[in-house]
Amino acid sequence: NLARSYSNPLLGVDLKSGNFNKPKTNGWYADEDFISRYTSLSSMVFQGVKGNEKPELTTMWTLIGYPAASVCVPVWVKGGEKGLPKMLAPDETRHSPMSRNANKLLKTVYTFDLDTSEANAKKYFNWEKLYNLQGNGIMQKVLAKEAEVLPRYKALLDGWRKKNKVDAKQIVELNAKVDEELAAFYKEEFDL
């Protein structure tokens, strides 16, 4: 969640509070005041293992592309190349579908047009596009989808922890289902 944090304690600002949305503000903010930026390409968190657990249980929780527009998906080394979700794997363009989708959405968020400066176009973001009072911002939709997807992965991981063993077949099976769901999600919600 740190990569999707839009709070700045030094300024007393938490954009998610609702106090910084329309009609109270115009919805434009400088990204340099927050962790996520125009140049943010990904975010990963490694969840290690306890002393009695096998290293294969180490989990990399992954956001590929602009973090506010990317659904988090876990990855395990034990899955090998076949265990890598297709949404995260590079395709013929050498980009992953998730990265491509998230970065297309980034371009809709960074559309500052109050002046013609290229520098400002990549400096100011439209908070309303990401998170709004109607609940249909890009990040709000992504987080809702993530809330559907992640519990299934967490259930697998919990089962593996009890056995102290990752089942690569289960990784491939769940990834296949989630890949289809995520492709449909980006198509239905964002026409990507």
Image (tube, rainbow, N blue to C red):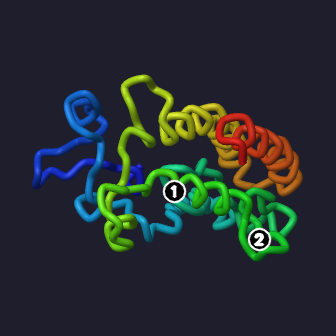
Residue drawn at 73 percent across, 48 percent down: 163
- Element type at mark 2: loop
Alpha carbon separation for disc pair 1 and 2: 19 Å
Residue drawn at 78 percent across, 39 percent down: 184
Residue that carries the numbered disc 1 in the rendered image: 106
Q: Is residue 161 above or below residue 149?
A: below
What amino acid does circle 2 point to?
Answer: Pro
Q: Is residue 49 above or below residue 156?
A: below
Q: Nearer the viewer, residue 76 or 49?
A: 76
Q: Where does residue 24 sit, x and y in percent of width and height?
A: 20, 30
- Element type at mark 1: helix
Residue that carries the numbered disc 2 in the rendered image: 90
Visible in this render: residue 81? yes
Q: Which badge, 1 or 2, comes first in the chain's sequence?
A: 2
Q: Nearer the viewer, residue 45 or 98?
A: 98
Circle 1/circle 2 CB separation < 8 Å = no
Q: Where does residue 171 sit, x and y in percent of width and height?
A: 80, 52
- Taking the view exactly as shown, the residue that stands out farthest to the top is 134
Residue drawn at 70 percent across, 36 percent down: 152
Q: Nearer the viewer, residue 108 or 55?
A: 108
Q: Nearer the viewer, residue 189 or 25?
A: 25
Q: Is residue 113 left or right of residue 26?
A: right
Q: Is residue 188 above or below residue 75?
A: above
Q: Is residue 31 left or right of residue 13?
A: right
Q: Is residue 28 left or right of residue 128?
A: left
Q: Where does residue 54 sit, x and y in percent of width and height?
A: 66, 63
Tally the numbered discs: 2
Q: Where does residue 82 sit, x and y in percent of width and height?
A: 87, 64
Residue drawn at 56 percent across, 40 percent down: 142
What amino acid does circle 1 point to?
Answer: Leu
